[in-house]
Amino acid sequence: FTRKAIQAGGITLGHTYHAKDYGPMLRSAGFTAIGTYEMPREGDVIIIQPYAGGNPSGHMAIYDGTEWYSDFKQRDMWAGPGYRAARPSYTIYRKN
């Protein structure tokens, strides 16, 4: 869903089965990783790595300037309670 939202904005990404693997495609499309202490901005995309016992695909979401969205409106940047508790590594990408 996030890939489709990005593409609807005119940015073409390749396809991969796992959300965790979209980082290189985002970089190829002109996105760069931002620092973990930078505030997210509209259009930023987060790639969250999987955690033990969770979805092996990881997670991908986009920020609209107020909320994080994937295939649903998220409570925060973490995709749910498992991610929130495990806090796996993540990267936020920004289109420059």
Image (cartoon, grey):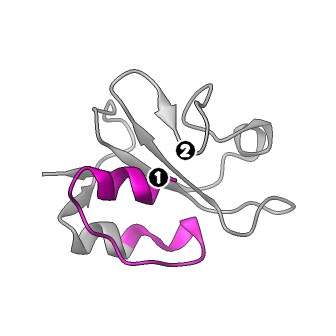
Indicate whether 93 appears above or below 50.
Answer: above
Residue drawn at (74%, 69%), measured in percent from left and top?
A: 56
Measured as percent of width and height from the top left, residue 44 is found at 32, 43
Amino acid found under the numbered disc labelled 1: Thr
Measured as percent of width and height from the top left, residue 17 is found at 59, 77
Residue drawn at (60%, 31%), measured in percent from left and top?
A: 74
Residue drawn at (74%, 60%), measured in percent from left and top?
A: 51
Measured as percent of width and height from the top left, residue 6 is found at 33, 54
Horizontal side, residue 67 vs residue 56: left or right? left
Amino acid found under the numbered disc labelled 2: Ser
- Please report contact status of discs 1 and 2: CB closer than 8 Å, yes or no: yes
Quarter-of-image position of residue 38: top left
Q: Nearer the viewer, residue 89 or 78?
A: 78
Q: How many marks?
A: 2
Residue extending furthest toward the front: 8
Question: What SS does tag 1 mark?
Answer: helix
Question: What SS does tag 2 mark?
Answer: loop
C-alpha distance separating marks 1 and 2: 5 Å
Horizontal side, residue 33 vs residue 91: left or right? left
Which residues make up the magenta segment?
Answer: 1-23
- Disc marking residue 70: 2
Residue drawn at (43%, 59%), measured in percent from left and top?
A: 3
On whether residue 13 falls in the magenta region, the answer is: yes
On whether residue 36 falls in the magenta region, the answer is: no
Q: Nearer the viewer, residue 32 or 26?
A: 26
Residue extending furthest toward the right: 53
Q: Mark 1 highlights which residue?
A: 2
Quarter-of-image position of residue 10: bottom left
